[in-house]
Image: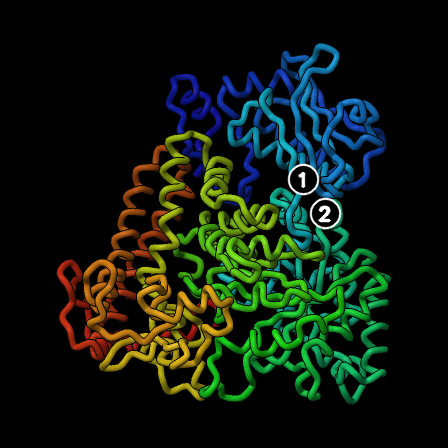
Amino acid sequence: MRLPRLLLIICAAIGLTSPAWADDGYDLWLRYRPLPTAVRAQLDSRATAIVAGDRPSPMLAAALGELHRGLEGLLGHPIGSGEGSGAILIGTPRSLPVLATLNLPLGKLGGEGYVIRSLALGGKPITVIAANDDRGLLYGSFALLRLVQTGTPLDQVDIVSAPKLTLRVLNHWDNLNGHIERGYAGDSLWDWWKLPDYEDPRYTDYARANASIGINGTVLNNVNAVAASLTPDYIAKAKALADVFRPWGIKVYLSARFTAPIEIGGLTTADPLDPAVAAWWKAKADEIYRSIPDFGGFLVKANSEGQPGPQDYNRTHADGANVLADAVRPHGGIVMYRAFVYAAQDSHQVDRTKQAYDNFKPLDGKFADNVLVQVKNGPLDFQPREPVSALIGAMPKTPLMLEVQITKEYLGQATHAVYMGALFEEVLKWDTFTKGRGTTVAKVLESQKISGIAGVANSGNDRDWSGSTFNQADWYAFGRLAWDPQASSERIAAEWAAMTFTPDPAFVRAVVAMMMTSREAVVNYMTPLGLAHIMGTGHHHGPAPWVHELARAEWNPVYYHQADAIGIGVDRTASGTNAISQYAPPIAKLLANPKTTPENLLLWFHHVPWDYRMKSGRILWDELALHYQTGVDQVVAMQRQWQALKPYVDEERFAKTEAFLTIQLHEAEWWRDACLAYFQTFSKRPLPAGVPAPAHPLSYYQALDFPFAPGH
């Protein structure tokens, strides 16, 4: 409920204002609330006017509109009504010739990089946003607003920035019926039924949010694609979205179903080496580009989880990718071909975590030069913690595109506060050793001629976009790390907190501390010490390590923990599946021995006895149980931290986060109790001191059923 305006005025007059206004989270990190008086005064001196060249392009017009919107919100008054004499100059050396006289380092910034510099010109303080292209001006405008929002004095600004990755793309797993696969923030943003005739204003706000963090592409439809997405009706709908997104620097892409030539093309085959199939794909690409001249290209999931693909015709994945790549090549398009594959048949004899490498490594150098092989960060499936996929760095002749999941399919879904930025950074800093020590995932990606990263989007039509305020941080962190994969996730968290709530240092420090422990907490109470994929079947909600009766071995959680009377974990050394052989020799050597394997991945690579002595001096069983308890304790600590921050947060977002932390605690306790009750049937050992007995017998947890859980 909003306070009446008169009451707000009275409260302000007597000094009783607090951040208690209603705030539903719609504005994300682009809130642009008035800054403290002292900060506004400094900004006023440099924001008397915004100067740009004549006849701005639609993209520059978007940038100028955002600058006015942001600065006027932060100042609390219109641009030009302050007492300063300075100005903000925005342009390229062509559009504002004065910029060519300032010796700005634009030479190596490409089309998306920018310079922001404060200096004196004609005796007056100015701040320059300069770039080689309007794309750089757009990103530079948002960067300037970010600096102001986070309290950086403009008289000290001197920034040169350019993205280190070419393609920074969101993958929307959105279906044409409006449902989102693995979506936890309502239904799809795209109202396909009303498109193309009605363009929801929210599409523009979505584009603004993405542009503010440097995202430059979006795949509109689910990787589990239907052929209808490529029909004329849906191409027209995609065109409408592309037209909205274009001024914000965002290209649209479509997921392509491999058998579309049969399903909507009237052919009898989708064999990629059949000339008629190649001709059909070329004609379809031409049709799309006539409607969307800057169409980005196709995303493909093939021969995985029942999807059709080239192997159905005894062809390779390179054959399948290249026929699509040839179709979009004349238009400058690309193909992102997912490496998330595992056999259509039961893989009981083949470690599922090896299959992407086994399928794609032999094809290195056989893909067209406008194909990127899109590789999940881990060899399994977006678990709370996995080792990095061995495929990253192992295909030097093939551009690889990292895929991460922003939506939290396996990490508590919408309600658990788990800062994914910490996970993304851990992946990007993993040393592949593929070209010697220091060859991190980030450096592998950055070294490629075509480079990119994809994030499975967490946005939906919930009013707060992402299902919770703290889920917004994951979207934000993805974009910022896509721009600079070597950036600090902790610093990014501080930016987000300052922009989303308040730049007050006391608040920011406390929230960042909470965020930076949250990912480790979920690993502890779900899958400690390298456990993985022990979630409920289908919906992946809650613990179910006991599931064993599903038709295929790798669909069962028991496949991933292999607990027995001796111990727990999967032997992936030479005596087991030998998955370690896929890694560079220094890593393989490290992982071959449980004593040198990082303990946070121990059970991923080794079947370890219950009495195995850990580095702490405790036996494995005690260590496992205490990790589960630590995860619960960390959520309790997060609750305390959030309660202490109540004076800084508006009532609506505070209450929602408070409620979600309560859910998270209950579910963390459920995870602890259910998993320990089950694993104790094998260990036959008592719980260590400090770990309470499960609240219910194992049969209680095994009987829980969630047929209507989100994400099913």
What type is the residue that disc 1 sits on? Answer: Tyr
Q: Position of residue 417 (x, y in %)?
A: 40, 52
Residue 107 vs residue 226: left or right? right
> Quick check: marks 2 and 1 in contact, CB under 8 Å?
yes
Residue 118 vs residue 507: left or right? right
Q: Depth check: 269 or 351 in front?
A: 351
Q: Position of residue 28 (x, y in %)?
A: 54, 43
Name the residue at 70% across, 40% down.
Answer: 113
Name the residue at 46% across, 60% down.
Answer: 408
Question: In which quadrant of the rendered view does residue 80 lie?
Answer: top right
Question: In which quadrant of the rendered view does residue 628 lie?
Answer: bottom left
The image's colour scheme reads: rainbow
Q: Position of residue 631 (x, y in %)?
A: 29, 57
Residue 283 vs residue 596: left or right? right
Residue named by callout 1: 139
Name the residue at 38% across, 36% down.
Answer: 509
Can residue 454 be seen?
yes
What type is the residue that disc 2 sits on? Answer: Gly
Can residue 458 be seen?
no
Q: Classify 10 Å Cα crowding around label 2: few (below 14), some (14-19), many (20 and above).
A: many
- What is the residue that sits farthest to the top in this orientation? 123
Q: Position of residue 701 (x, y in %)?
A: 27, 74
* SS type, badge 2: loop
Residue named by callout 2: 249
